[in-house]
Image (spheres, helix red, strand yellow):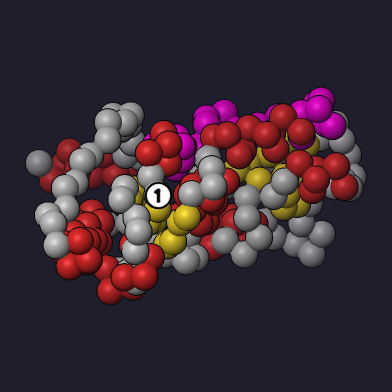
């Protein structure tokens, strides 16, 4: 895009590694690349040529969050263009939709994820926006027994890159704490959700190399 002389607007979170890495690919002192996080950022954005703009997105944004900012960009800059392929993370949106469904029946939500993961933090926000208490842990040992006192239904979710083994360890720890507090067995129910069947094709050069190996 920069080779074509376009100014680029990056939709993403300040300080996120992917955002910093992507923006770092644009060379020169006057880079012609801008970061926006919200519709408010779009309203105050100053560019050189409104008819020569394009945008890209951080891949771990939810579709809903990105759509609001993209809509604001298109309203303010009608000539703006976007990427040829939608590169927003389907897993991020699916998890947020699942939390919105899950919180209807939960007293507490535990998110398995890293504090520097934007999509994990967003899952906590989704639960809290529904007035449900939520905490994030990146390992089972971080669970606090006080969180579970008086709670009957606890929802578990995880960031898009959280390993399954961590989720299982958190579940095992919750069952242990719950049994100790109530003196009863704790049951686990997996909710139905979107079946993720997206396939990512290899770049041509790597695909050819694999064919030669086999």
Viewer-nearest residue: 2 or 72: 72
Residue positioned 49% across, 65% down in the render: 116
Relative side of 206 to 159, left or right: left
Q: Is residue 75 magenta?
A: yes
Relative side of 38 to 61, left or right: right
Q: Relative to 110, does residue 202 appear above or below in the rendering?
A: above
Residue positioned 69% across, 49% down in the render: 37
Relative side of 147 to 85, left or right: left
Q: Quadrant of the C terminus?
A: top left
Q: Is residue 51 visible?
A: yes
Q: Residue furthest bottom?
A: 141
Residue positioned 54% across, 63% down in the render: 17
- Decide: few, some or many residues near mark 1? Use Cα within 10 Å; few <14, some 14-19, many ≥20: some
Q: Is residue 138 visible?
A: no
Viewer-nearest residue: 85 or 16: 16
The stretch in magenta equals: 73-100
Q: Position of residue 108 (x, y in %)?
A: 40, 53
Viewer-nearest residue: 57 or 153: 153
Name the residue carrying label 1: 107
Q: Quadrant of residue 174?
A: bottom left
């Amino acid at each position: 895009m920069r080779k074509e002389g376009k100014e680029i607007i990056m939709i993403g979170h300040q300080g996120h590694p992917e955002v910093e890495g992507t923006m770092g690919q644009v060379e020169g002192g006057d880079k012609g690349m801008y970061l926006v996080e919200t519709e408010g950022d779009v309203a105050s954005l100053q560019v050189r040529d409104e008819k020569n703009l394009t945008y890209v997105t951080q891949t771990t944004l939810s579709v809903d969050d990105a759509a609001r900012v993209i809509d604001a960009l298109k309203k303010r800059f009608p000539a703006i263009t976007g990427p040829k392929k939608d590169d927003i993370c389907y897993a991020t949106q699916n998890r947020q939709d699942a939390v919105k469904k899950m919180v209807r029946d939960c007293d507490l939500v535990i998110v398995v994820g890293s504090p520097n993961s934007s999509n994990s933090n967003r899952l906590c926000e989704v639960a809290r926006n529904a007035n449900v208490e939520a905490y994030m842990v990146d390992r089972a040992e971080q669970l606090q027994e006080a969180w579970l006192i008086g709670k009957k239904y606890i929802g578990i979710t995880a960031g898009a890159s959280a390993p399954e083994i961590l989720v299982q360890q958190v579940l095992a720890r919750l069952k242990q704490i719950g049994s100790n507090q109530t003196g009863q067995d704790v049951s686990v129910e997996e909710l139905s959700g979107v079946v993720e069947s997206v396939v990512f094709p290899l770049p041509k050069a790597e695909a050819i190399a694999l064919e030669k190996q086999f």
